[in-house]
Each structure stands twice: as C-alpha cells, then as structure tokens.
Image: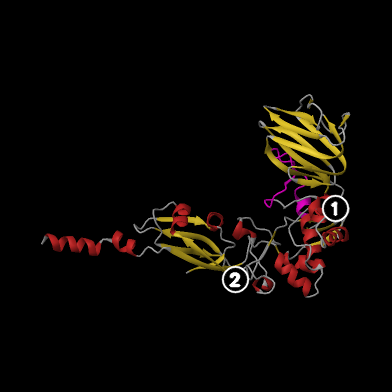
Amino acid sequence: MKKLLALLVLIFSPTTAFADAVPGHFIITGSGFGHGVGLSQIGAEGFALEGKSASDILTYYFPGTQVTTAPVTQDIRINIAHQSTYQAITGTNLALYRGDLTTAPIAIPQGAVLKFASVGKIISPTISMKGSPTQVLSPATYFSVTWSGSVKVAGISLKYGFIGLRANAGKMEVTATMKLDTEYIYGVSEMSSAWPTAAIQAQAIASRTYGLSRINLIRKECDCNVYNTIYDQNYVGASKESEPANGLRWRAAVDATAGMSITYNGNPINVYFFSSSGGTTQRSEDVWGTSFPYLTNVPDPYSLDLVLNPTYSHWQRVLNQSDLTKAFGLPDVATLVADSRTVTNSVISVTATSSAGVKSTLPVGTFKTKLKIPASWFQIN
C-alpha cells in the first residue's frame, strides 16, 4: 500500500511533471533592430535608392510634418565625459580660462599637456611638459579651454568650439560647445556616410532637429543639452567627417541641408530614428506611453529586404536557461510567452513560468535589454 501511495504521489506531483518539461533553451525568431519609432534608417536607404528626396523620406516616416528651412544660430553643449575624475587635453595653441571665455586666458606652451583632476568640489589643473617640472595651477569649479586646429580629450578629437570642465557632485562634467547647425552635425555618427545622398541628408536633417528639440534646456546632471552617446545621438567628433573616402560625403550632406529641420505646426518635432523594423514602424504610445500625431505606424517594407538588411531582416536568438532565470528572477523557466502585442504585431510584455507554476512578467523593453534581443518583433518557439 505504501509503495502504491508513493507511486501516485510521484505521478500526480505537478512540480515533477513541470520539471521534466523544463527545456534547456528557447529559440526566438524576429525582424528589425531598435525601438521602431520614427525614421527607419534602412527604410531611408531603400527610398533613396528608389529616387525619393530627403524631404520625401522624412515626411513619409513623420506623417503630417514639414521640412522647413530657417537660420539655426544656437550653440549646443555636448557632454563628452560624464562624472569624470581625470582628463588630459592635448592640442595646438591651447588656452586655459579660469571660468568662461570672458576671463583672461592662460597660454599653454606648445607640446604641453593640460591635465585636470577632480578634487572634492573643485577641479585642479596642471601643465605637464616633457623635460620640465609639472606646473600646478590654481583650482576652480569651472574651466574653459580653446585651441586652434584640433584638440583631443576623452578619446575624442575636436575641431570646433570650446571645452568646458565643471565640478559636479565630487566629479567633473566635460563638455564641448559648438554651433548646432553644422559643427555638431558634422560629428554625429548615426548612419553610414557611404549610403545614398538622400538618405544621409535625411539623417542630417533628423539629427539637427533632434538637437533643436533639446537646445533650450541645460541638464544639471551633465551640464549639457545632449550626451555624446546613443542615448541622445552618437557624437564622435572630427573622426566622422575625416572618414576615408566617405567623410566628405557626410560633410556635404550636412552643408546641403544647413538650417533644415522637421517641424509640426511650426515647431521642431520630437524626432526619433532607428535601424530597422519588423515591416511597420511603431506608434510612440505603444513604446513609451506618450502619443504624438507624427510618431505613428507606417509601412516599412525595406526593413525586411534581405539585400539591404541582411543581418536584421530576419534573425534568431537562442536563450539559455541560465540567462532566462537571471532575467526573470526564477529558479527555472518552463514556459515563455509573449503576452500581448501592439497594432504592428510587436510584443508588449513577456511572461515566464517556472516548473512550480510561479510567473514573472517583464516589459518588452526590459526583456530586450536583459537578453540582448534586437527588436520587439519576434516569435517565441
């Protein structure tokens, strides 16, 4: 009798039944790369090859907008080193200002290196030159640096504007300030300069519009309008326009579109762009919860073109148990389900269920980040 009871417990135990069914991995297949809102860069390439102009491309992906031209006179401040403790600046004809550019400049000897260290609530500068003793200068909470030709700081070569170093929360924020219209856009690296002219012109206009939409606010945490990373726009400085063969094409695209931006009811739009989609772009409310009339879904067929988009038109990812359990905070994952989808068939959230029947749900953005999934258009196999 005891043997019979033990056998029945074994047969009808749900934990054991689920445990036997826990797979070693799940396979996800999908399309696209990025959030899917706004300008599809692969789409821009496809439409440019079709003969469409930059304005045609932008007004297609941002319905109801216009591409307008007006003088852009503002400077933009880019954070190139956030919460830094030390920076070295090298260049020709360096000049140091203790404060902004209205203060008296300190000429730096040719060949010297300007070094800055964050010390408590101040920044301490020194001048280092081979064969000479290090010269320690008076500290301050803010310094400016100018040059002629080019300068290198935080791994970035700069040609334009000036550098600022400001003490902030025990560290320092290093920024580059320059003209938004052209000088900043010359250094934005968000699209291959080898792509068709209309596509890179569309990107230049979109990038300028992005800067214009953020020009009126200096963020305290970075002493900047924008960061130099993909969380704003990927800014790489002089290396973009100095690219062999194609750097001059990008500079020409920026110059040809000077003063041009994307507007809605006369104001610069909240512009977004991404690599490719699952065949249709996303509505902003489905991704971030905020609706804009021009950030809606439009067909994006070139994203599924195997020739234009060989890597992300169709992709596959294998998700191992160890990665899934870490992402969902479960001891194991027996089932993985896409709970709901948007009008464009992209996933909204994903639920994992353990062998014991415990569920854990992640928003798709978190799911993508934790498991390195390229886009929200996918199926779980």
Q: Quadrant of residue 358?
A: bottom left
| Residue 255, position as x, y percentages in the image | 88, 58
Q: Main secondary structure of the magenta part?
A: loop
Q: How is the image coloured?
A: secondary structure
Q: Which residues are magenta?
A: 209-231
Look at discs 1 and 2 and give the one toward the viewer: 2
Kindly identify the residue that appears in the image at 86 percent across and 51 percent down: 72
Residue receiving disc 2:
314
Q: Is residue 221 visible?
A: no
| Residue 181, position as x, y percentages in the image | 84, 52
Could you say which is closer to the camera, residue 106 or residue 277?
Answer: 106
Q: Quadrant of residue 87?
A: top right
Pointers 1 and 2 in contact (CB under 8 A)? no
Mark positioned earlier in the residue sequence (1 or 2): 1
Up the image or down, 31 lies above or below 213; here it is below
Q: CA distance from mark 1 to mark 2?
A: 36 Å
Up the image or down, 234 lies above or below 99; here it is below
Could you say which is closer to the camera, residue 202 or residue 105?
Answer: 105
Badge 2 local density, few (<14 within 10 Å), some, or many (20+)?
some
Q: Is residue 186 left or right of residue 349?
A: right
Q: Quadrant of the N terminus?
A: bottom left
| Residue 120, position as x, y percentages in the image | 67, 27
Q: Is residue 324 visible?
A: yes
Q: Is residue 160 left or right of residue 315?
A: right
Residue receiving disc 1:
182
- On residue 107, the disc is none
Q: Quadrant of residue 291?
A: bottom right
Outermost residue, front direction?
A: 131
Within the magenta stretch, is there residue 35?
Answer: no
Could you say which is closer to the camera, residue 126 or residue 13?
Answer: 126
Indicate the amino acid at tag 2.
His
Q: Is residue 360 left or right of residue 34?
A: left
